[in-house]
Amino acid sequence: MKKASPTLTPPVNSRKKAKQRFIKKNWAFYAMVIPAVLLFATFHTFPALQGIYYSFTNWNGISLEYDFVGFKNYLHLFKDKVVKDSYIFTFSFAIMATVLVNAISLVVAIGLNAKIKGRNFFRAIYFLPNILGVLIVGFIFNFFFTNILPTIGERLDIQFLMVNILGSEKYAWMGILLVVVWQACAFNIILYLAGLQTVPGELYEAAGLDGANYWQQFWKITFPMIAPFFTINMVLSMKNFLMVFDQIVAMTAGGPGHSTTSISLLIYKGGFQGGEFAFQSANAVIYFLLIMFVSIFQLKILQKREVDM
Amino acid sequence: MKQRTNWPVTILITLGSLIILFPLYMSFSIALKNPQELAKSALAFPTVFRWENFTRAIEATNFFNALKNSALITGVTLVLTILSNSLVAYAVARNMHKKFFKGLYFYFVSALFIPFPIIMLPIVKQTSALGLNNPGGLILLYVVYGMAINIFIYVGYIRSIPKELEEAAIIDGCNTWQVFWKVIFPLLMPINATIGILTCLWAWNDFLLPLIILSDSAHATLPLVQYVFQSEFGTDYNLAFSSYLMALAPMVVVYLFAQKWIIGGVVQGSVK
């Protein structure tokens, strides 16, 4: 039998080997991700699946027994007036807020991007609402609508403002819209400003020489150049506003009646306090499908438009 | 060619900023008055500063306890998030050519489309069954839920780092863990700052998750305390507003000093 001779590997070979060992089957990479995957599956995927599971039962969230009821919860959802109203409220609110926030933010961002005094100072001021707690801001505005605005209304003799609008079934949504816009603009302004700063100044000079006015410059240069930022802002704001919760808790708690009950608030209230665990789980499933559909739809449309421009 | 200052826009921007500052002025004005002065006028500049409202609010809401809870939860969440999420993202980013890791990437990122309410009802049952209805459980959820967006941001950044540095480290005898902690992690500092800022803002200001997870009122965070406080002493506005301002103050102070970083971090996090 031949004895294996001890070999002294030349340095070049050992380097190659080290690299190969690293690339071939690197268990360390698996060790890095496996705990995270397990935790994510346990605390995110599993409860989401559980939610779907419960949506086919009649569980009230407390009792020990429950039965399968098939699609009964889903059928009831479509007949339930409170549910229907919450979808109408949430979607019209989200659309209005998205349009308002993006329009205002774009205008302010253009202003901040102009040659103004103290730009960094103002940028810091306009971003301030973004770092404040949503709930507390809601409480502050609650006072404004309940106590300040009616006083102003009386002084100026404007009938509409004399009563607390948060107490009005018809107009309470306006109060919530205002606080949401006040706070959400902060984030959108900063993002649009970042977008505007990527537009090279020479483009405007050239357009100016060609005789384009401000309006034309905006639509032909600015807007196409910041299209990706427009996409991000539209998708993020729509998604955030569809989930509106804190502001409503702080201002109207969903009332008067259920006029400002958003979908997430309804799921929270009905699920935890109303004994509708299974029913609201079904509601959450529908809500999830709608949010996914809206986000993908927006991304598709807006990205297509980005390419076209 | 140097342009001249655009005064009309400067004036409009100044007026607009008053709309931002007005609610904060109003809060100060109310917090520093007594009920009689408030009844006369809420918006008039306070003639005497009633600082005792703040001392009363500190006692009534047990402010320092809530501050401690918020700081602890945010701080630990921040550290764990940066250490763990960057590590996971590194493994994913460097193995995107493998089906398993690519699948993982999409698994984490697709969670961005899943709205919280679908998880909300079951997670409450689950955390209380596992004894996680406390700050520890809350921190765990923040770290886990943050992964969806953080891995998206980290992976984008890590893929832009050239592999040569790692290869050199491997030749020097580092194993994969050492490569990450000694070579990659120090390079991630700019994006760690972004993730850190986003995580802090989220954990500090979040209301819904503490509301449903924390069962013991002694563990309540600052926003949660305001909520409880509001329903208990709702009409003592001077006290309430002192309390709101104190709850907002820590973040505002941080913002005053780190304003550029915070704005930069938020922009980085969204544009990625």
Image: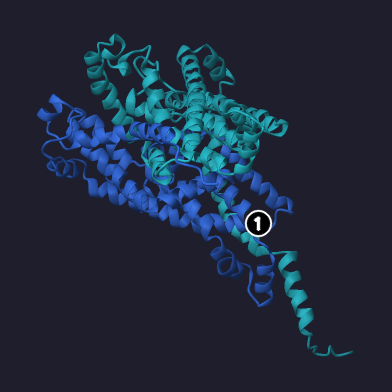
Chain colours: A cyan, B blue
Q: Is residue B209 above or below residue A269?
A: below
Quadrant housing the N terminus of chain A: bottom right
Q: Across the whole image, how many numbered discs are drawn on residues?
A: 1
Please say whether residue B84 is visible from this viewpoint: no
Which chain is home to disc 1? B
Residue placed furthest toward the right: A1
Which is more toward the observer, A10 or A276?
A10
Q: Quadrant of the C terminus of chain A?
A: top right
Q: Residue A230 at what x, y percent from top left?
A: 58, 33
Which residue is drawn at the image coordinates 73% and 64% (left, top)? A25
State the residue at coordinates (69%, 68%): B164
Point out residue A227 in the picture as x, y percentages from the top left corner.
Answer: 62, 35
Residue identified by numbered label 1: B160
Q: From the viewer's perspective, is B10 left or right of B64? A: right
Q: Where residue B219 sits: x, y (%)?
A: 30, 46
Which amino acid lies under the numbered mark 1 shown in the image of this protein?
Ser
Q: Secondary structure at mark 1?
A: loop
